[in-house]
Image: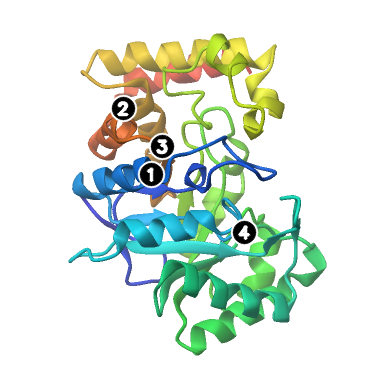
Amino acid sequence: MEKRRLGNSDLMITPIGFGAWALGGGGWEYAWGPQDDAESVKTIHRALDLGINWIDTAAVYGLGHSEEVVARAVKGLAEKPYIFTKCELLWDDKGMVHGSLKRESILREIEDSLRRLQVEVIDLYQIHWPDPDEDIEEGWSTLVDIQKAGKVRYIGVSNFDVPQLKRAQAIAPVTSLQPPYSLIKRQVEDEILPYCLEQNIGVIVYSPMQSGLLTGKMSRERVAAFPADDWRRGDEEFQEPRLSRNLRLADLLGEIAAAQGRTAAEAAVAWTLHNPAVTGAIVGARRPDQVDGFIGAADFRLTEADLARINAFLQANP
């Protein structure tokens, strides 16, 4: 699998990274429902066996559990993947989440993540959300100090807009941005992606398959059967009238992909990688076979005719 340099770093990453959000399991505000840890480990191993060389997680996923699962999966491997994680989102004893960019809070978080991941250095450490906005400078300055202390190799941000990126850059260079980007969520195209391309800020997009909507495997019946603690139950993209439109888009991707022996999931991810500003896409999976369904996106190139069909749909169904 090809590799691309992430922003100003020396990290050479594959176009697809493994997303470990759902591996945190249930019982918290943004859970995906129950998840078997042994299945999670097998899924990570499948991704690595197929060439993926980086894993993206966060302290908040599963309230620390996702990081622990990642550590279990990579323990003892002769060739370990890059591990990216995030700070800023904290939780209470009821699993409810809130943000903090205070220095003391982040200094506690980095130690907790290092312990859970069982590593001495994290490859990429990111601010999860710019919340609260007024504390961005304090939070980013703290990440700079953590990097100088040798506890992380590179620092980046997630969900920042351009003015927020500029505020961080005034303190220290930003290696990467992690924004949401898919055929359903395209807001970053107008300003954020062009700015990152101009500034040599690496971009690793999340939810390129829109949390399963564009895999070709989603249906109204499956949505109705989501576990009670699956956060997607409350997401407008999984509710009418948007759900029907999104499923039609997935059907179109399936048609386009089938012509080249590919899957809708591969087409959805490949579409995000087509943007020159995008370095890599984070793709989550809960079972090994799901990895098989999207791994081909790394070398799948949509044709101009494919892109024209997709654009026509988007224009007709805004």
Q: Amino acid at mark 1?
A: Ser
Closer to the chain start, of discs 3 and 2, is 3
Q: Quadrant of residue 188?
A: top right
Question: Mark 3 — residue?
Answer: 286
Which secondary structure lies at badge 2? Answer: loop
Instruction: Name the image quarter holding the C terminus.
Output: top right
Q: Nearer the viewer, mark 2 or mark 1?
A: 1
Closer to the chain start, of discs 4 and 2, is 4
Closer to the chain start, of discs 3 and 1, is 1
Q: Nearer the viewer, mark 1 or mark 4?
A: 1
Please report the residue visible at 38 percent of the width from the left and 55 percent of the height from the top: 55
Q: Amino acid at mark 2?
A: Leu
Q: Amino acid at mark 3?
A: Arg
Please report the residue visible at 50 percent of the width from the left and 82 percent of the height from the top: 147
Disc 1 to disc 4, C-alpha distance = 23 Å
Question: Mark 2 — residue?
Answer: 302
Question: Mark 1 — residue?
Answer: 40
Query: Viewed as shown, does residue 263 lie left or right of 316?
Result: left
Residue 122 placed where, x, y %? 43, 72
Query: Viewed as shown, does residue 55 lie left or right of 45?
Result: right
Q: Kindly check if marks 3 and 1 are in contact, taking CB atoms under 8 A apart as contact.
A: yes
Farthest residue, direction bottom: 149
Question: Mark 4 — residue?
Answer: 128
Residue 62 placed where, x, y %? 57, 50
Disc 2 to disc 1, C-alpha distance = 31 Å
- Mark 3 surroundings: few (<14), some (14-19) or many (≥20) residues within 10 A: many
Which secondary structure lies at badge 4? Answer: loop
Residue 32 placed where, x, y %? 57, 36
Disc 4 to disc 2, C-alpha distance = 31 Å
Q: Amino acid at mark 4?
A: His
